[in-house]
Image (tube, grey):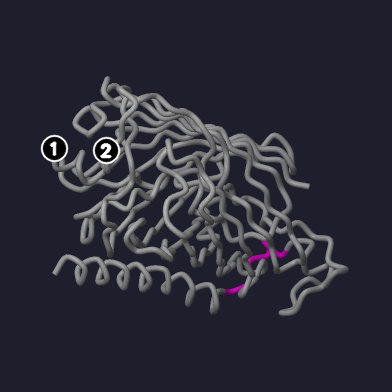
Amino acid sequence: MKSARSFAVAEALVFVLTLPLLAGLFASPRNAHASDREAEGCTGWFPDFTCESKGRYAGFSRPMTMPYLFEHPFITTDLQAVGIWQELPERSVFEGGYVDVAALQIRIAVTDRLGFIAARDGFAWFKPDLGLVSHDKGFADMSFGFKYALIDRPDAGFILTPSLRYEPDFGDHDLFQGHGDGIVIPGVSMGWALADNVYLLGAVGAQLPLDGDANSTYIHYNFHLDYALTPKVSPFIEVSGISYTSSGDGSTNIDLESGGRLSLAEVQSALNTGGFEGNDFANLGSPDVDGHDVITGAVGVRFQFSDDLSLGLAYERPLTSRKDLLKQRVSVMAVYEF
């Protein structure tokens, strides 16, 4: 029953994303978005190595929540520095505490339509309040892949971009990373200029583990709406969610201060916490999470200092009673586009 409900949620989300897709396909041209792509002859379906236009449409800012999963639809070459402070709920198995993350994302426009993505990496510090659990630091998992601008209509302010990424077993186990045989991450994202100075980004995707016992399976969905208050300041709101469709077996180990280890399933049973997951930071492979959903909301602002340099700030917290390991989060992202 729970799995059926999660798949129904996923179907509804696909339908929601289909509405702007159809609108984008049949939208009337918007002169404000007839950028230099048209002038440079960059409107074809096939790669054009002579195209030198910028991949991001003017006015659109970047998403902030779920930075490892919410991939924007534009084909860009850039570096993005990511800093995250995340507080853990007091009622979680760790009785509060926090996680800090510092990461560097890399994107490369191979052609005007094909882009390389390396959006998940970085170093993390884990400091729970529960005295029995050790404080650890180390490297997070990595992911890499490609995205392709399937529908690219700057004249209508609309773009649709499928993507495919792979997350290998890489990160430090002390940080609940690097479990299983890797995860395949298919997805699709879109951008749509709704009106003058109003811009929508959306995405839907999935985490499909190669080892369904070590990792959970889930669908993620994301929405970003921003308003260009000035050419340099864009406040925004975002809503992101995760729907778990399949649970792991809870074999992930948790290090204790005493030097011992307990499996996640043993800890959940001993403390009677029930199943919980690691949101977008860690796929714990927790038991008893299938059919559950977590939805978060965020507010923030993006400062566009120049065509190439911007800085984003966001505050995020759960909108559902279920929080898993996210009580609140502050994110800072600085991006430089080449």
Whether pointer 1 and pointer 2 mark residues with C-beta atoms closer than 8 Å, the reply is: yes
In this rendering, position of residue 329 left or right of residue 304: left
| Residue positioned 30% across, 22% down in the render | 258
Residue 128 position within the rendered picture, expressed as x and y whole percent measured from the top left: 33, 25
| Residue 322, placed above or below residue 328 | below
Q: Which one is in front, 12 or 249?
A: 249
CA separation, marks 1 and 2?
10 Å
Mark 1 packing: few (<14 Cα in 10 Å), some, or many (20+)? Answer: few
Q: Position of residue 165 (x, y in %)?
A: 56, 62
Viewer-closest of 307 and 319: 319
- Looking at the rendered image, the disc whose residue lies closer to the viewer, 1 or 2, is 2
Quadrant location of residue 321?
Answer: top left
Q: Where is residue 73 in the image (x, y as percent from the top left)?
A: 58, 61
Residue 182 shown left or right of residue 304 in the figure: left
Q: Residue flagged by tag 1: what amino acid is it?
A: Ala
Name the residue type under label 2.
Leu
Left or right of 183? Residue 42 is right
State which region is magenta. 28-34
From the image, tell me which residue sits under label 2: 262
Q: Residue at x 42, y 61 (%)?
A: 207
Vertical position of residue 292 compared to residue 46: above or below: above
> Which residue in the structure is indicated by mark 1?
270
Mark found first going from the N terminus, 1 or 2: 2
The numbered dot on residue 153 is: none
Residue 282 located within the stretch drawn in magenta:
no
Q: For numbered disc 1, what is the local secondary structure?
A: helix
Label 2: which secondary element: strand
| Residue at (23, 60) in percent of width and height | 290
